[in-house]
C-alpha cells in the first residue's frame, strides 16, 4: 500500500475543476483490460487500473465533515452499488488517519477543509491503489469548505449552489474509485481545453469532465432551460453514458488483469 498522491486538482468555481438485489449492467465492458473509452478514462497516472468488487465504505475525518457532507455521497454510493455492482456504504464512522497515509483497505475518508489545495475553490482527491493488482484501494477526499461557507459561491440561486455541491462530491468520489478527467480534443485544434468533453443526446457531459461537468460557471436562467436545468436534474449522478460504463469496465478489469 503506497503513500497516496493527489489526483489533479480542479477549480470548480473557476475555469482553470447492499448487499441485497443489485442491478448490474455489463453490456459496455470489453473482454480485455481497457483503460479509456467514450467519455471516461482510468486514473492510471495514480496507479489505478481496476475497481475491486469487494465493498467500500465512506467515512469522515471528523464530526463536522460527517454533518456537512454525508448526504452528498449517498446518491453516488447507491448508484455505484446498484448500477455497477460494487457495494459502497456511507457510514457514520470517524477516521483520523492523516492524508499522507492510506486508510484501511477500501475506506474512503472525506474531509471538510478550507482551501485544501491552498487556492480558492479547489477540492481534491488523494487516491491509494493496491500494489499487487492496481485496483482502487480507497483514500482521502478533501472538499473545499468554501462552497458552504460562502452562501452564493456558485450562484445567487440556492438550488444551483446545491446542485453544484452534489456534482463536485461525486466528481471527487469518482477519482477515488479510479476515474480520471476524460477531457479530449473534441474540436481537433490540437489542444485539450477545460470543459472540452463529449456530450450525450441531452447535451450532458461526463461528471468527471473538468471542470464542473464541463460547464462554465452556472448562472440562473429565467426560462429554466440550459445548463442549470439539466445540471439540477442530474446533480450528483455519474452519467449513464460515460462515467458508469467506465466504472463497469474498471470492475471488469479487476478480473481480466488477473487472467
Image (cartoon, grey):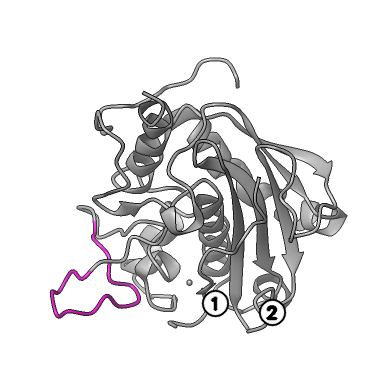
Query: How far across and down, in percent of the image, does residue 205 sit?
Result: 31, 59
Compared with residue 112, is residue 44 higher up or lower down, i.e. above or below?
above
Question: How many numbered callouts?
Answer: 2
Q: Which residue is at the front of the view, 201 or 189? A: 189
On-image quarter of the N terminus? top right
Q: Which mark is residue 230?
A: none
Residue at image coords 60%, 60%: 125
Query: How far across and down, in percent of the image, does residue 9 sit?
Result: 53, 71
Q: Which mark is residue 150?
A: 2
Please provide the residue range marked out in magenta: 185-199
Query: How far across and down, in percent of the image, does residue 121 sit?
Result: 60, 78
Residue 224 appears anywhere in the view: no
Magenta stretch contains residue 24: no
Residue at image coords 39%, 75%: 221
Q: Tag 1's secondary structure?
A: loop
Q: Which residue is mark 1?
A: 154
Q: Where is residue 78, by image quadrant?
A: top right
Q: Which residue is at the front of the view, 235 or 242? A: 242
Answer yes or no: do the residues labelled 1 and 2 have beta carbons within 8 Å? Answer: no
Query: How far across and down, in percent of the image, does residue 157 sit?
Result: 54, 74
Amino acid at each position: 500500500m503506497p503513500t497516496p498522491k493527489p489526483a489533479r486538482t480542479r477549480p470548480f468555481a473557476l475555469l482553470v475543476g447492499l448487499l441485497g438485489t443489485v442491478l448490474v449492467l455489463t453490456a459496455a465492458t470489453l473482454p480485455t483490460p481497457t483503460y479509456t473509452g467514450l467519455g471516461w478514462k482510468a486514473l492510471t497516472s495514480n496507479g489505478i487500473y481496476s475497481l475491486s468488487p469487494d465493498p467500500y465504505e465512506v467515512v469522515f475525518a471528523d464530526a463536522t465533515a460527517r454533518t456537512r457532507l454525508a448526504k452528498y455521497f449517498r446518491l453516488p454510493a447507491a448508484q455505484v452499488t446498484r448500477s455497477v455492482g460494487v457495494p459502497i456504504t456511507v457510514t457514520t464512522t470517524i477516521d483520523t488517519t492523516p492524508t499522507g497515509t492510506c486508510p484501511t483497505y477500501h475506506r474512503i475518508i472525506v474531509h471538510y477543509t478550507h482551501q485544501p489545495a491552498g487556492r480558492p475553490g479547489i477540492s481534491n482527491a488523494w487516491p491509494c491503489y493496491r500494489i499487487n493488482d492496481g485496483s482502487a484501494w480507497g483514500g482521502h477526499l478533501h472538499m473545499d469548505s468554501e462552497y458552504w461557507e460562502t452562501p452564493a459561491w456558485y450562484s445567487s440561486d440556492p438550488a444551483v449552489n446545491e446542485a453544484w455541491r452534489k456534482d463536485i462530491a461525486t466528481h471527487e468520489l469518482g477519482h477515488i474509485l479510479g476515474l480520471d478527467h476524460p477531457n479530449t480534443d473534441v474540436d481537433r485544434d490540437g489542444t485539450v481545453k477545460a470543459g472540452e468533453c463529449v456530450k450525450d443526446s441531452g447535451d450532458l457531459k461526463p461528471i468527471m469532465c473538468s471542470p464542473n461537468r464541463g460547464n462554465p460557471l452556472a448562472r440562473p436562467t429565467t426560462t429554466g432551460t440550459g445548463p442549470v436545468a439539466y445540471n439540477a436534474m442530474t446533480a450528483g449522478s455519474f452519467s449513464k453514458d460515460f462515467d458508469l460504463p467506465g466504472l463497469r469496465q474498471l470492475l471488469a478489469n479487476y478480473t481480466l488483469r488477473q487472467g
